[in-house]
Amino acid sequence: MNSGAQGIDRTERSRGVRLRNLSLQGWIQKHRRDHAEVWLREAMPWQVLAQIDFDPKMQGRDQSIEVHESSYRAQLRDTRVQDNGRICARVHIETISQERLRGEIPWRCDFSVVYESVTLEVVTVFTKGDHPLKAIVEKFILGDFAGIQMPRQGQALLVLARVLMSEVAANRYSGLEYLQRFDQIPGGVRGVRDTGTLGPYSGAAFPVLSEGRIFWLMYAWDEVVAHRYGIWFAAQCERLLIVYANPNRTRHHRCAARGVEIISLAEFIDRLPEPMRRAYDRHLWLIREGKAPPREPATLGEVYSAAERRGQRFSAEDLREAQSVFGLDICDSYDALYVMAAYNLVNAWVSWIKDRPGRFTDALFKELYSFKGRLAATLSRIVLKEINGVDIFLDCADSGCVAYIKVHGLQFSFKSVTLRGILFEYRKSDGEAPVKGDYLLEYSRSRRNIPQGWSGVRLKPVAAPLLHWARRLRNERARSLLVK
């Protein structure tokens, strides 16, 4: 039975029929936040659904919709009146093109939207049958990585990254609105500097979470797209935080606008309180690599056995993991061990590859070769926080400085660490302004810089399994704190 015209006045017809509260926020208001399939609702194309004209006269006609320069085709397939008087409309949504913005979830399926016939208030939204990724996401949420069989298409990773980001956002923020539409205000709500060569974008913004135009949280799969969002929407709100899942080597279209912060999903998770922030390391590994995390060594003995079996080999997965943890906030010795193991792996890789012909034209080599500048910033954080169980000795001479770091019975060492000119910005608490200082140089001249002799144990040859073991130790610590 084709119906659904009840409750629609002439004004509604003249501008099309837009349902009320057709949004994730509206759905959550009518369901518990811990609903068994809230992950599926979070991944739905709400921005597209909200723009569909539900006038029954539109049945069978294509509707073109654009969201952040991704194009979609929507079609109202049928509407029927349920026994309780509500209207159930079935709509088909199909992704047409995503030429500029990679990483949006591709859709090609039907959605059923149930709404009140008089008020046009949405009651619920669902898909027919089981979502093809339901089993994967359920195992992902439970941490059952061994049971995950990833399909070849990339949609699974996009959904998992989007779900993980939403889960972390829900744990970090409260009282914000989900996926609200904001039309662009000419000139914006504040002044920002010139955004460079990237052309303007006049379409609406759909932040994942928002507090009016005071604060927006947005998400992008690619880092380059995150910076594009930053350039487009910097002037449209007071503060803009954009989280991306997939880092890019390209540095085109960097957004440097005041009030805009662009961070990786790993850095976003790192802002959760202890011990929750460590609970997602293996989730991040799966999203980054597209496959279940490997088994991690349980003991140092297994670390050396694994290194003996595999030799000194470096995988792209290990290098990406090491890069992703350089900026982690170090709160205890387990964090320090994991981050030092990451620097040790990159140090070992640079030593191994530096004699390779053409290395200076290799983008990855050039990016990682300068890791010791980031190491100096990490050591600055440790000495400023006075992390228990981590001892640092900076042995400085005219020829350079060697850093020795003792943590969990291991001693990491790095040559040619630069101390001068490392003006590290440090904020003691969220309420204080950051202060820049030459903290590492000051530490090297203080009484806290207690000498260490070299242990004689070389950690470069065991770099990869050592990183895996450090990750496992850190995660086990997090799980034990969560149980308590």
Image: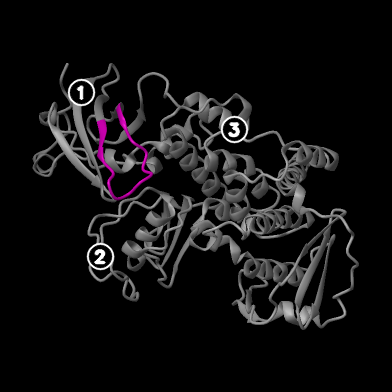
Going by the numbered disc 2, the residue's amino acid type is Ile
Given residues 291 and 390, the one toward you in this image is 291
Q: At 84% across and 43% down in the image, what residue appears?
A: 300
x%, y% of residue 71?
23, 43
Few, some or many residues within 10 Å of mark 1 (<14, 14–19, 20+): many
Please state, as top left, top right, bottom left or bottom right, where the C terminus lies in the image: top right
Q: Secondary structure at mark 1?
A: strand
Q: State left or right for residue 240 relative to residue 435.
A: left
Q: Secondary structure at mark 2?
A: loop
Few, some or many residues within 10 Å of mark 3 (<14, 14–19, 20+): some
Q: Quadrant of residue 217?
A: bottom left
x%, y% of residue 460?
75, 53
Going by the numbered disc 3, the residue's amino acid type is Ala
- Which residue has dot 2 on it? 185
On screen, residue 478 above or below 242: above
**Residue 98 numbered tag:** none
- Which residue has dot 1 on it? 79
Which numbered disc flags the more N-terminal residue, 2 or 1?
1
- Disc 2 from disc 1: Cα separation: 36 Å
Can residue 199 be found in the magenta stretch? no
Going by the numbered disc 1, the residue's amino acid type is Thr
Q: Which residues are magenta?
A: 93-109
Q: Quadrant of residue 144?
A: top right
- Disc 3 from disc 2: Cα separation: 44 Å
- Disc 3 from disc 1: Cα separation: 42 Å
Can residue 106 be found in the magenta stretch? yes
- Which residue has dot 3 on it? 292
